[in-house]
Amino acid sequence: MTSEREGVVRRGHRIIVVGGGAGGLELVTKLGDKLGKSGAAQVILVDRSPTHIWKPLLHEVAAGSMDPNTHQLEYVAQARWHNFEFQQGELTGIDRARKTIAVSACVDQDGDELLPARELAYDTLVLAIGCVTHFFGVPGAADNAIALDTVDQAERFRRRLIAACVRAQNGRGRVGEDGRPRVDIAIIGAGATGVELSAELRNTAHVLNAYGLHQLDPRRDIHINVIEAGSRILPALSERVSAETTKLLHKLDVGVLTAERVTEVTPDAVLTASGKRIDADLTVWAAGITAPAVLRTLDLPVSRMGQIVVGPTLQSEADPDIFAFGDCASCPWPEQQTSVPPRAQAAHQQATFLY
């Protein structure tokens, strides 16, 4: 692993922001505009991906109703426009004594190394690496269900959806009781992502036509079920919103199964604790999130959920030079006697606060 701590001329205070999600990108852009442009600080963004896309749009990518290339932002371009530096790679460790972070090697699609594993020195470190899908140990979930955390995962779902529809139209897929070709989609988790995806999938007619799938009726032949362990969908919102959204999904011919805890995901079905078997050519897992595993390896205090524990200033309890915010941080919310929830709005407010 190479290190830039030795032999590098340091120019001003060095701020590293790890994670280019909505909050991290907003923060590094503002810091670059103010401190990077004036030379008061060196501002660096580290992210494992070369591009940013707003995560709530991934269900549209998965449904084929949005081209991700038109909505992605290249970090290098943003860095050039806003006076910061971009380093691609994944955070693998922190050396607090030497004030360096370890970043993984970066490889291309063929597995060839583009950038080596390396160390980057910091004066101030900000962690904003978000969250990852939580499969809760359900057998088969990680292998047979697709999460929607990244563009690659969303595009994988879209490709598999088109493939399933092609097979169905050509008599190589599932057939319904009415003798018509049938494609079954199961969405596990009825939070915002699961509900929005189920509704968006009803708008796939133009996608099917583009592939010459004129014999498939998107409403009649594509069957969608949303499966929720809780008593209602959209549990984070009010009961009124939940009830109205349930009515809307029914109008879209989307099956809504509540109080159904998933116990296993197989390649062609979802099994629940009540004994139900829901056929599935494709399964999406949108049932929960958790903090990235790397946070537990950084020798910083973490919450029960694995998030970095921070105070009201968003500084780590163990190191005042390390900040964390967004989904990867457990930040107190005294007014509610709880922690700040993992919401995009909260990350935006925290980025503004840090700036």
Image (cartoon, rainbow, N blue to C red):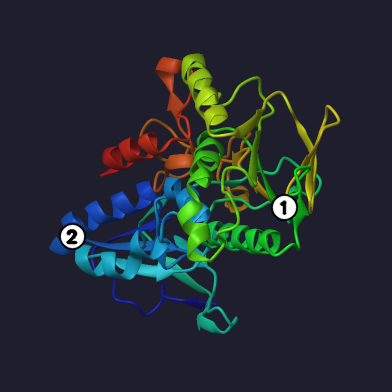
Q: Please state the horizontal and vertical placement of residue 100, each as a whole percent of the image.
A: 46, 63
The residue wearing badge 1 is 281
Residue that lies at the very extreme toward the right in this rendered image: 275
The reply, left or right, for residue 68 in relation to residue 33 is right
Residue drawn at (70%, 63%) of the image:
167
The reply, left or right, for residue 96 in relation to residue 39 is right
For the N terminus, the image quarter is bottom right
Foreground of the two, 68 or 249? 249
Foreground of the two, 341 or 152? 152
Amino acid on which disc 1 is placed: Asp
The reply, left or right, for residue 349 in relation to residue 265 is left
Q: Please state the horizontal and vertical placement of residue 270, each as a whole percent of the image.
A: 77, 42
Foreground of the two, 148 or 348? 148
Residue that lies at the very extreme toward the left in this rendered image: 38
Question: Does 67 appear above or below 6?
Answer: above
**Which sits earlier in the primary sequence, circle 2 or circle 1?**
2
Q: Please state the horizontal and vertical placement of residue 298, each as a whole percent of the image.
A: 57, 52
Foreground of the two, 127 or 198? 198
